[in-house]
Image (spheres, rainbow, N blue to C red):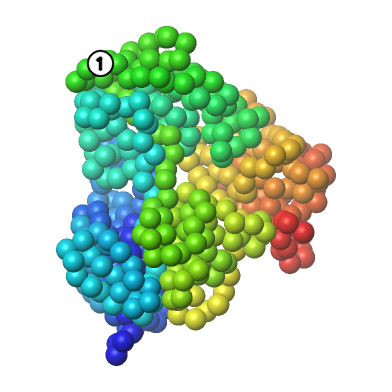
Amino acid sequence: MATERIVIVGAGQAGGRAAEALRREGYKGELLLFGDEPHEPYERPALSKGVLVGQAAAKSTLIHPREWYAAQSIELRTGLRIEAIAPQSRNLITADGRAVEYSKLLLCTGSRVRPLTIAPDGMRGVYYLRTIPESETLRRALADCRSLVVIGGGFIGLEVASSAAQLGIAVTVVERQPALLDRALPAGIASQVERLHRSRGVAIELSSRATSIAGGDTVKAVVLEDGRELPADVVVIGIGVIPNTELAEAAGARSSDGVVVDEYCRTSLPELYAAGDVTSHYNPILGRHIRLESWQNAQNQAIAAARNLLGAEKPYAEVPWFWSDQYDCNIQLAGVVEPGLEIVWRGERQGAKCMAFGVLAGKVRLAVAFNAGGELRFARRLVEFGAQVPSASLANPAVKLKELVPEAAPRSLAA
């Protein structure tokens, strides 16, 4: 190409932050940002919380207003799907048949909700929650709702349950696993979240599978495997997401539970990078590939990818971090769940503020804070360093966490 052109496919949080970072880092060439949603890039966390209960406007989730992109000479094309990548000629094919040439390409195609196969198509009162329109539609439905059934006990389902319960709605959460948050937390720590919801009147059905949704044109009940029927004016399905890997896979990029990228956000194809929910990225701290669905990863990996597109050659290496607000409880976690973790509690579990650690072979691998976000920054460093800390010290609130952080450089937890 006569003129350098970077194209970003996917105008969600990752795509928006990548475009922002490219201009901030001094990139002067052409910059195109494609999104198949009609909105400017926005952040999703508030959709299940503030936006859902009417405390925040949908526009408050936007990273920047549309005019900001024009001022930054970023060509933002929303409501337009990219149908194919031709990596040999470095061209994209849009849904309306146009070819767009690129010098370098960044895929931020994100993920989509995992559908529940038993959910009848078109039944009124059955919802998923992923986008701004879905949040606004669900908010209107909850205004007249007396009984809500949430299918799926992950973070999105529990945040919806929390929001609905605070609106005075009778809520039941159905989870097929024996514990909530099965992928995110060990059962011994997830039990704290279960107690939180039960204390607010939410019914929890663990080890329960929904076999059908009854009601004809409009939902009436969720039927469980044991034959019980849970009355429902509204059903929200939150059973996970699927990474949007199809575009990259069709172009020949390597994929395994996400588009596979190295620590520099490079795919297996030349001049093609990827960031955000869609990636299975190599994490140098953990020493393996992981796929994350979090605000932190969408933002920070996108910024790292932008810098590497410009030649920084700097690895993206961060301890996974996630947060969730449920009722008056702020939950933050650093690290990932692994088999065999010893759970160490710090502080009074029945109190408003406490922490839990996951320890393996004496090393801190996971930290979870309940209304203790200020302490998590030190706990996160313990995970990053793979610190050897006596369980008694972790459990003792009189021992300051910052005094337990090693002074040596971080190293891979795989070591």
Residue occupying image coordinates x 42% and y 59%:
249
Q: Nearer the viewer, residue 310 or 170?
A: 310
Residue occupying image coordinates x 47% and y 11%:
226
For the question of whether residue 74 can be seen, the reply is no
Quarter of the image that includes the N terminus: bottom left
Image coordinates for residue 321, horizontal then vertical, percent: 55, 51
Compared across the picture, whether 183 is left or right of 20 comes to right
Q: Is residue 254 above or below residue 154?
A: below
**Pointer 1: what residue?**
215
Residue occupying image coordinates x 38% and y 77%:
88
Q: Nearer the viewer, residue 97 or 150?
A: 97
Image coordinates for residue 224, horizontal then vertical, percent: 43, 15
Determine whether the residue tagged by mark 1 lies in a helix, strand or loop: loop
Of all residues, the one furthest to the bottom in this rendering is 2
For the question of whether residue 342 can be seen, the reply is yes
Of all residues, the one furthest to the left in this rendering is 96
Q: Is residue 264 above or below residue 160?
A: below
Q: Amino acid at mark 1?
A: Gly
